Image: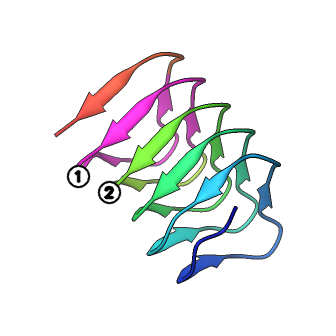
Amino acid sequence: MLEPPCFIDSGAIVKAGAHVGPYSVIGRDCHIEEEATVERSIIWANTRISQQALVRRSIVGRHCHIGRNAVLSDGVVLGDKSVITDYSRLES
């Protein structure tokens, strides 16, 4: 489900059941897996958001991996090549 206004760059894959909320930017060649949610966030190129993960009001760098059921919210900023393991919770 895509909720405008949002931007999804070329080569990005948003799988069935994923939700991209308003004011979100999904970079080139990103993968948003099933039931993942991205709201009011910037996801830079080549990043993978795994199943059932939640990214809200955050910025995620290039070539990152956000694990299954992980939560990033309220101002989290990740640098390039960051890895967040499954079931992790990061809040600012």
Task: Give how far apart the Cα atoms at labels 2 and 1 are.
Answer: 6 Å
Amino acid tagged 2: Arg
Residue 2 location (% of width, % of height):
66, 68
Query: Is 34 situated left or right of 25 in this image?
Result: right
Q: Are marks 2 and 1 in contact (CB under 8 Å)?
A: yes
Q: Is residue 73 magenta?
A: yes
Closer to us: 82 or 2: 2
Place residue 86 in its image quadrant: top right
Residue 48 location (% of width, % of height):
66, 43
Residue tagged 1: 75
Closer to us: 44 or 2: 2
Q: Residue at x 75, y 39 (%)?
A: 34
Amino acid tagged 1: Gly
Q: Is residue 69 magenta?
A: yes
* Residue 36 to residue 22: above or below: above
Q: Residue at x 36, y 38 (%)?
A: 72
How packed mark 1 is, by other alpha carbons closer than 10 Å (few <14, some 14-19, many 20 or more), is some
Residue 6 location (% of width, % of height):
56, 78
Q: Bounds of the magenta span?
A: 64-84
Image disc number at residue 57: 2
